[in-house]
Amino acid sequence: MSKAFFVLDDGRIFEGTSWAATGKTFGEAVFQTGMTGYQETLTDPSYHKQVVVMTAPHIGNTGVNAYDNESKKYWVAGFVVRNPSTLTSNWRSENDLEAELISQNIVGIQGVDTRAITRHLRDRGAMRVGIFSGLELSREEMVIEVRKQPAMSGAYLSDDVSTDSTYVVPAIGEKKFTVAALDLGIKGATPRAMAERGIEVHVMPYNSSFADIQAINPDGVFLSNGPGDPSTMTETIDLVRQILGEEIPVFGICFGHQILGRALGFETYKLQFGHRGINQPVLDRKTGKVEITAHNHGFALQAPTDSGFSTVYGPGQVTHISLNDGVVEGIELIERGAFSVQYHPEAAAGPHDAAYLFDRFVDLMVQYPRKVEAL
Amino acid sequence: MARDTSIKSVLVIGSGPIVIGQACEFDYSGTQACRVLRAEGIRVILVNSNPATIMTDPEFADATYIEPITPEFIERIIAKERPDAVLATLGGQTALNAAIGLFEAGTLDKYNVKLIGADVAAIERGENRELFRAIVEKVGGESARSIICHTMDDVMGAVAQLNYPVVIRPSFTMGGLGSGIAFDEDTLRQIAGAGLRHSPTSEVLIEESIIGWKEYELEVMRDKVDNVVIVCSIENIDPMGVHTGDSITVAPALTLTDVEYQKLRDLSISIIREVGVDTGGCNIQFAVNPVTGRIIVIEMNPRVSRSSALASKATGFPIAKIATKLAIGYTLDEIKNDITQVTPASFEPTLDYIVVKAPRFAFEKFQDADPRLTTTMKSVGEAMAIGRSFPEALMKALRSLERKEAIFTFTEARSGDEKSSLLESMKMPTEYRLQQVQRALWLGASMDEVFASTKIDRWYLRQIEFINDVARTIAEPGELSLDLLKLAKGTGFSDAQIASIRGIAEGDVRKARHQLNLRPVYKTVDTCAAEFEAFTPYHYSSYEEETEVRPRTKPAVIILGSGPNRIGQGIEFDYSCVHASFTLRAADYETIMINCNPETVSTDYDTSDRLYFEPLTLEDVLEIVHAETQAGPVLGVITQLGGQTPLGLAAGLKAAGVTILGTSPDAINLAEERGAFGQVLKEQGLTAPEFGMASSQMEALTIAQRIGYPVLVRPSFVLGGRGMEIVYDDEALSGFISRATDITPDHPVLVDRFLDSAIELDVDALYDGTDLFLGGIMEHIEEAGIHSGDSACVLPAMTITDTQRVQIREATLKIAQGVGVSGLINIQFAMAENVLYVLEANPRASRTVPFVSKATGVPLAKAAARISLGSSIAQLREEGLLPSEGDAVAKGISVKEAVLPWNRFRRADGRGVDAVLGPEMRSTGEVMGIAATFGESYAKSQISSFGPLPKAGTVFISLADKDKKHGIAPAQGLSALGFHLLATDGTASYLLEHGVSTVVVRKNSQGTGPMGEKTIVEMLNAGDIDLVINTPVGRGTRADGWAIRTAAVQRSIPIITTTAGFSAAVEGIKALQAGDLSVAPIQEWLKR
């Protein structure tokens, strides 16, 4: 084990030891507060270009397995843990975490005061970071290298994470609907949740055209989660406007929610340090009930929470808000079948409290049937 | 949505005395409940028989009834107070059972009182095994295959289907009482037989064994609009088979993937919904097969539990407080998280640290008891520790237990076969199994071998291997470098452990560490892994980069708590520490509490300005003193309130330059060291019983000849009355000496004159260097020779004269002066033939402080804390904290009775342990009865301590020869009250000679008579006897007496083992016959 450094762009440096792959890596430093689900985090495309600090101290206890992957590869730019496990103990485990990280070439660091890092990011905001392990660089040199890196604001990353060509996740049981899922960094749990409800999911590249979507004659369109700054997604926003214009039911999650919001004319903004965890309380304003939800977002939507709003597609409202900080967590169009949430009803990792939203999507597809069939 | 404004008054039911399985966690939860309700402007009526609780302090409720927690008494309270609602989910199983009793008796309907927190149907669904099983099935979960049985025939039928081993679980008992595992028919009959008796519904469940599976608990909360959150997950290191209260447990769960954890979460939520716990907390237990992942739902507690208290301390999420708010109608999202102040309570805490809880046992007090850990809880207390890694938290938890056997050792094998014998013995879980695991691994056993013996998850075994690896690194030659010390300290090694591995002094390790400037930092328990700023300074130590201790300006006082509960040191000491914190905060000091007991009020983050959840060792305390001294002015440390634990640290702290507030370590030594104390008494002209120290049998016999029999003998090197015995002749003395095998000149035996006809008295007093304030003179009801903690006592003393009272006060003053007390002192006196003997003095808060404070209304512990900080008694009188003149005056007559855990322990052969009182303390808790007469007060105390006296019926009397004389009068009394008296030969003929009509009954050893006449044991088992008076003969278990006492304990028949107790019982029965006992709140008594 050699020394390793976690170097923030404001000059604060934490010293630890090397872990997983060695070398250097850069990204946006963010912290994740889930006590379970490190494997899902590692394989979530939304973490692309982010160096993830796990606040739970022991990571890797249950190893990794093929089933819990949320995508085909490990996306995080770097992985920061306090105490990586040197032994895997779980009946489903297939590999050791560190071995897997090395094979995926993820640079890590261990033995750092992750709580101090978290407090720093909480107070100063998410920022650029580099992990340097097994390298002979001065502190100054490391900070300079970090400061050369691009910031997350303005980052356009869909191209990196999206599927190259459309693939179909078949419905489980009887097929009732067809959904076009725009892959902006989709997690495996999402098409799975839809498939369980009789939906055949066509996962399509982020740059699919409206014609491509029409070609499969979908009952609804799903906008996935994903990394990057939503303000860069102008083409996708235009696409969504076309879809809304055709009155095809739309359901967006996370990045998809931000894109739907922008398509309705709202701005997005960067949060100080984002929401990343699986314990986040969200209020469903229609029912007054609280759901505990999985979050992973650094940007949020600016929409009026004190009253409804009107759009070219008719009236809408904010349906969900974060009880921790009042951030908009969900919106809907009242007279159209379109809604979105900032958090992750597909969970993985995280609680299943919000799974009902997929049922709501199904209901909307029933309520707003395909025009094509009506003709 | 907001609170239900129709609720204007609430009756809160407490949990009564501390017993195994139900300890001071319910004082913590009940105190929170009372605070919440009062803050809402609701009138609070409280019933709790336990005077040692904070919740029964007069200021926590509008009307505090220190009365028995039975449906009958509670009905009287309801009739008087007419509350709108009853809250029974925060007082453990006792309160829940009382509430069900009230419901079933129709009392709640009659007085139009609603039950809040959980309704009876939900409680029934949660606790009735058949109903619960159906619910588990309905929500898609699995239960262990099992069969409900009501008779022994049912039981035998069940095992034929399930095969051995099987688990036996009685319904509606707490702490797993009466449950166990049977591998064969004999044990099955024993356990199931007892279980059928213990269960109020004569119902036991026989189920397939899931021993060795992984065990988890989830703490769940739900509000009235169906918001549900999981507060905490807890993993048991000891797999299924050991009661969770006796397991070493970890929070959060560490060996589940998210997929598996979410399954447990989903099941928990579905279950709480289906059971219908509308508002409040509950706890759901799961077993997970380590090979297949099959999940079995074990059980739920539809109330706040011991685990809830642990989860609250582990996460910073105050379950009881929030459960109370939910009960009066709030929803989770309407309640703010105290710690962050901005986020709501409708979230799930996330931890960035590891919590380990370790149980503390008292097997040495019950030498006959089977030491195996089973599904019946046997531990008497617990310690919790927090660290930034599992090894760190585990090592802290083990040293928090204050047992040298609990600390991991890294020495050479004690014998060639130590490893293999450890691997064999760890197959049976016992108190120190984890230490066996560590030793075996240290000695080279493989993880697989240890796993095969214990089924402890390999992840934990690997962590223990890591600890061993670090120990090996420490042992390597070379200097104590910064890197090495960082590694060792970060792994949780204490300076003492490092020193012992290196063969140097603890002080040298500390010095080297401080020279390298390596000190712990203090992190914060904040519910959210630092996502939001925390406003409650609830800290734990870790060897990391950044500390979170904030600077302060006000002068601070550090209060040392009392550590894990144990017999002899429990809630009473926490009470005094909490009082000190309250009063010093009120006097504008900042208070800093250090303690490691998760059950207590002192470790509630609301109690003190700052809380350090840390072990009470010299090293840990010194580091906190240092950190706080860096943060602002520290006046010193209070060590006299938390019992022996902090008192034992006083000298070391002083030597390290820390100011001890109140009585100085030198004064403590004067009182504790026998020779020095003898000198004090001599100088003050006071008398102590004669004594001598013997290092051989011959010497002991000589001393006994000199001072005269009976004598009290004990090894000089053990505390707390352990191994103490009263012997009446040479033969018995020789017997004792030959059993005390390690008697040597270094370890002599103490031989004291035993004052067998004396009255024992306990005094609690305050002294400020000038004035003495006498808190109370308590008279023991049991005669001398019974440990003061196990003896009932009455305040005011009933049989001493005014002159004797003056004499006692003078003696107390002289001792306080002679020792140099500043604060509290407790003295035990004996009065024999008008001579006052001093037995011992403790210059600290005693177990009786809360009782005296409740009986007199004088807050002794608060006054002691103020005196420690320089206030005089005169000033405190002026302030109104103490009465303006005179000593404390008892209002009414108060009786304190001890509660004993006989029914928890069995011998290895499955039979009960002997239920006899002696010089060794064995009680776990206490109750108080208060009334206008002794008889009423005593009767109440017996009802509260689970031995209600009968109003009529049959009494069995068996007296030792020495007791016969004193037995005549009470026997006559009982006869006159209409009781039918039975006795064995000797006692019967003695009583008949003295004109008491008595019928002879056969001894157990005589067997059933030729005409089928039952023996006394058979009669007990048949339920023919209502009260047993049985005084033991000499030492221990003469077979007949033992059989009688254990049968009585198992049948829950009240049993009295002293003649003084017998006389008191007669008074009590008279009071019961005279009519219903009245109830009155303590606030009313204090006005009298």
Image (cartoon, coloured by chain):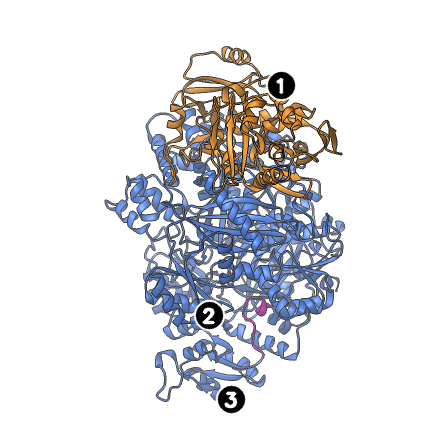
Query: How packed is label 3: few (under 14 Cα within 10 Å), some, or many (20 or more)?
Result: few
Which chain letter goes with mark 1? A
Q: Is residue B189 magenta?
A: no
Which kind of residue does numbered mark 2 sit on?
Arg
Subunit ID for the residue under disc 2: B
Residue A76, how many percent across, how many down?
Answer: 48, 24
Residue A122 location (% of width, % of height): 60, 27
Mark 2 is surrounded, within 10 Å at the Cα level, by few (under 14), some (14 to 19) or many (20 or more) other residues, namely: some
Question: Mark 3 — residue?
Answer: B995
Local packing at callout 1 (Cα closer than 10 Å; few below 14, some 14-19, many 20+) is: few
Please name whichever residue, B809 or B446, is drawn nearer the observer in this view of the structure: B446
Q: Position of residue B471 (x, y in %)?
A: 36, 34
Pointer 2 with pointer 3, Cβ within 8 A: no
Between B1076 and B734, which is closer to the camera in this rendering? B1076
- For the colour blue, the matching chain is B
Q: Which residue is mark 1?
A: A234
Disc 2 designates what residue?
Answer: B197
Rendered location of residue B917, percent (x, y)? 47, 66
Q: Which region of the structure is painted magenta?
A: B941-951
Q: Chain of mark 3?
A: B
Instruction: Give the main secondary structure, helix, strand or loop, of the magenta stretch.
Output: loop
Q: Which of the two discs, 2 and 3, labels the residue nearer the N terminus?
A: 2
SS state under label 1: helix
Whole-Å distance between the Cαs marked 2 and 3?
38 Å
User: Vertical placement of B781 versus A294: above or below?
Assistant: below
- Mark 2 or 1: the one toward you: 1
Q: Which chain is orange?
A: A
| Residue type beneath disc 1 | Thr
Q: Is residue B730 left or right of residue A327?
A: left
Distance from disc 1 to disc 3, alpha carbons, whole Å, reads: 108 Å
